[in-house]
Image (cartoon, helix red, strand yellow):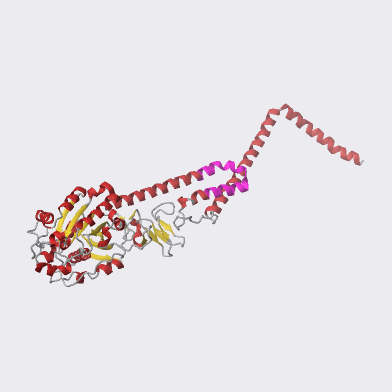
């Protein structure tokens, strides 16, 4: 009885299935089409779900790297590299791309290959960002360089005398950044390892930072790069009057700026303030100038001059006369290779050909102030050889001023120049002072040569002698006219040009 109950459903199933099977056999194309459609739909659904899952895994990896702090650890700056974080275009962009690919591969390999379009789009975005960033870097560097060229800015360290392509800058934390211009560590700003933000160009305010020389690490108080610099070496024998003339040049600038609104002549740095701060006292006729000691380190005395909206950094170099007697000591004066204007300071009383014709009374009066240097050609020759060694044929573009000092002492003597004018001064220098060979050599080597006769003592009213102002006006030729206007010399010492 139980077996009959079980057989009945089977019999009914067979009776129902048989017609279906017959229909399917008779209509097999339709059945196949239905099955293929079902499989296609199932495949599309599976692929879509798989793509969504892979895209979700990729998006999760991107979020983890870019927004959730999963950036690869930035390598520490190596030896010789600046202590600043790399900007995104300077390495982290590619590191993040590698991290995204690696993170996606770890959870979906080898199906990550199916994300090639996503990864290609990401890589393309990174490439566009890199191109835009480096084009911006190049444009900013080019604009900064062009501005320095147009403004005739050449930066020189007054301590080691090296020419600076760009200064180095010290952060408040003490770390030194030697390559602060736009690059892999920043475009507009860079971030020091201490998290302080620093501008990358003079255009953006680097001059306001603590500036140091990238070679000798000395502090550069004159804010290089902010204004053109004029390197002015004075050379000559010991006691020729270089120190007094340096003070006279500074005092002429200071005096010329006093009555002019917005004009100034300020010393920069402790050394300049110490050496030039007492210029009024040094220039008094009764003051005996303290000679520069041979062992004293040579440093540029910087004066910041402003007039007519323009600024000039004048670097005055006054080395001891003993340094110009030997090639070894002259070779230490690297600033000679950075200058285009030179002043040879000559004490006429030290020249035997000038001293001998003087009468006993004149000798007795002038003997206490006569220098020990007998031949100014020695210093001239040593300096000329050093300049030629450093700059070669470029010396032909340089200027040499031959400055004969002691104008106040020679005024009433038998060897005083016969009159003003360059021709009279040249004749006097060649025939009375015996400087003919020196001047002929100077004309053969330098682009321009001029003779001056100066009086580096102040007048009774405290004003500097016009002969110094005239010399300074020549030194400032080629600069904005406002600077020359500061040192107008309407009245000249008898014999000066």
**Residue drawn 24% across the image and 52% down it:** 384
Name the residue rendered at 56%, 53% in the picture: 64
**Residue furthest out toward the right:** 1
Quarter-wise, where is residue 237 in the image? bottom left
- For this orientation, the residue located farthest to the top is 26
Residue 380 location, x and y as percent? 22, 55
Q: Could one spot residue 318 in this view of the protein? A: no
Q: Measuring from the top left, give residue 156's x and y in whole percent.
A: 31, 57
* Residue numbers of the magenta segment: 96-122
* Magenta-colored stretch includes residue 103: yes
Instruction: Give yes or no for residue 367 being in the magenta stretch.
Output: no
The location of residue 415, given as percent across then percent down, is 9, 61
Q: Which is more toward the observer, 10 or 425? A: 425
424 sits to left or right of 10? left
The answer to whether residue 19 is left or right of residue 159 is right
Identify whether 27 is placed above or below 493. Answer: above
Where is residue 411 shown, x and y percent of the image? 9, 64
């Amino acid at each position: 009885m139980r077996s009959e109950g079980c057989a009945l459903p089977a019999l009914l199933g067979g009776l129902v299935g048989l017609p279906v099977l017959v229909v399917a056999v008779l209509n097999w194309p339709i059945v196949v089409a239905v099955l293929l459609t079902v499989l296609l739909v199932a495949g599309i659904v599976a692929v879509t779900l798989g793509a969504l899952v892979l895209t979700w895994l990729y998006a999760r990896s991107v979020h983890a790297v870019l927004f959730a702090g999963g950036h690869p650890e930035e390598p520490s700056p190596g030896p010789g590299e600046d202590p600043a974080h790399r900007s995104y275009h300077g390495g982290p962009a590619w590191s993040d791309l590698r991290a995204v690919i690696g993170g996606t591969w770890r959870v979906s390999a080898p199906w990550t290959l199916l994300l090639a379009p996503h990864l290609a789009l990401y890589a393309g975005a990174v490439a566009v960002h890199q191109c835009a960033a480096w084009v911006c870097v190049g444009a900013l560097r080019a604009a900064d360089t062009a501005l320095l060229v147009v403004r005739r800015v050449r930066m020189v360290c007054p301590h080691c005398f090296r020419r600076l392509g760009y200064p180095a800058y010290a952060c408040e934390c003490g770390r030194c950044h030697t390559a602060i211009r736009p690059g892999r560590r920043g475009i507009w700003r860079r971030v020091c390892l201490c998290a302080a933000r620093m501008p990358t160009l003079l255009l953006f305010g680097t001059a306001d930072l603590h500036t140091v020389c990238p070679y000798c690490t000395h502090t550069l108080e004159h804010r290089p790069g902010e204004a053109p610099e004029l390197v002015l070496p004075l050379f000559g024998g010991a006691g020729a009057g270089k120190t007094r003339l340096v003070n006279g040049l500074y005092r002429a600038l200071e005096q010329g700026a006093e009555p002019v609104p917005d004009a100034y002549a300020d010393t920069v740095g402790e050394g300049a303030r110490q050496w030039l701060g007492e210029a009024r006292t040094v220039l008094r006729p009764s003051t005996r100038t303290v000679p520069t000691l041979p062992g004293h380190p040579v440093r540029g005395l910087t004066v910041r001059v402003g007039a007519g909206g323009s600024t000039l950094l004048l670097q005055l170099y006054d080395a001891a006369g003993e340094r110009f007697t030997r090639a070894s000591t002259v070779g230490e004066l690297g600033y000679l290779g950075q200058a285009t204007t030179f002043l040879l300071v000559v004490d006429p009383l030290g020249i035997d050909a000038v001293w001998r014709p003087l009468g006993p009374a004149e000798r007795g009066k002038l003997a206490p102030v006569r220098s020990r240097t007998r031949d100014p050609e020695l210093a001239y020759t040593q300096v000329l050889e050093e300049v030629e060694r450093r700059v070669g044929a470029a010396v032909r573009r340089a200027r040499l001023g031959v400055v004969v000092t002691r104008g106040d002492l020679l005024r009433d003597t038998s060897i005083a120049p016969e009159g003003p004018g360059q021709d009279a001064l040249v004749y006097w220098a060649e025939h009375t002072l015996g400087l003919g060979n020196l001047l002929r050599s100077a004309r053969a080597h330098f682009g321009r040569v001029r003779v001056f006769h100066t009086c580096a003592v102040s007048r009774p009213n405290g004003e500097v002698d016009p002969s110094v102002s005239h010399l300074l006006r020549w030194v400032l030729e080629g600069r904005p006219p406002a600077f020359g206007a500061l040192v107008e010399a309407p009245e000249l010492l008898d014999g000066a040009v």
